[in-house]
């Protein structure tokens, strides 16, 4: 008799409302249930260029995952290490 194997797939979900001051990172399991794991806001914990966030790109470099966020009101770009979705870290701002 063969054992059945269950495959668990988790994807990262980033939710942002246009012209907000931050966004939420969540994880979506195979059954599409999304659980928020972190909230990021402008002016808190080193995130200083998120006012009017209007676009996000996800980039993988080596073994790290980054969110590159452009903003309207700050006229800037915030780069965030989201390799560990529950513990996002500000990396740079321009």
Image (cartoon, rainbow, N blue to C red):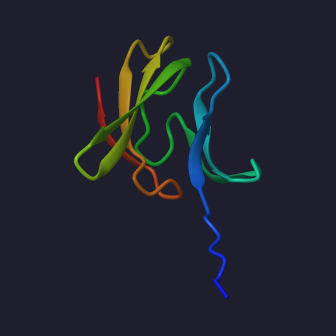
Image quarter for residue 93? top left
Q: Quadrant of the N terminus?
A: bottom right
Picture residue at 63% right of the left edge, 48% below the top: 26
Can you give x and y, in whole percent of width and height, for residue 67 in the image?
41, 35
Picture residue at 46% right of the left edge, 49% below the top: 45
Picture residue at 22% right of the left edge, 48% below the top: 62
- Residue closer to the observer: 54 or 26: 26
Picture residue at 45% right of the left edge, 51% below the top: 88
Q: Residue furthest bottom?
A: 1
Q: In the displayed structure, does residue 69 sit left or right of residue 16?
A: left
Can you give x and y, in whole percent of width and height, for residue 58 in the image?
42, 33
Q: Quadrant of the C terminus?
A: top left
- Residue closer to the observer: 62 or 54: 62
Q: Residue furthest left?
A: 62
Above or below: residue 84 compared with residue 71 = below
Image quarter for residue 49? top left
């Amino acid at each position: 008799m063969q054992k059945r194997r269950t495959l668990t797939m988790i994807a990262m979900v980033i939710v942002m409302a246009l012209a907000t001051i931050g966004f939420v990172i969540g994880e979506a399991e195979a059954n599409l249930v999304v659980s928020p794991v972190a909230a990021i806001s402008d002016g808190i914990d080193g995130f200083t260029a998120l006012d009017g966030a209007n676009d996000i790109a996800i980039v993988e470099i080596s073994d790290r995952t980054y969110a590159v966020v452009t903003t309207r009101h700050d006229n800037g770009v915030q780069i965030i290490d989201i390799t560990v979705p529950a513990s996002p870290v500000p990396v740079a701002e321009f």
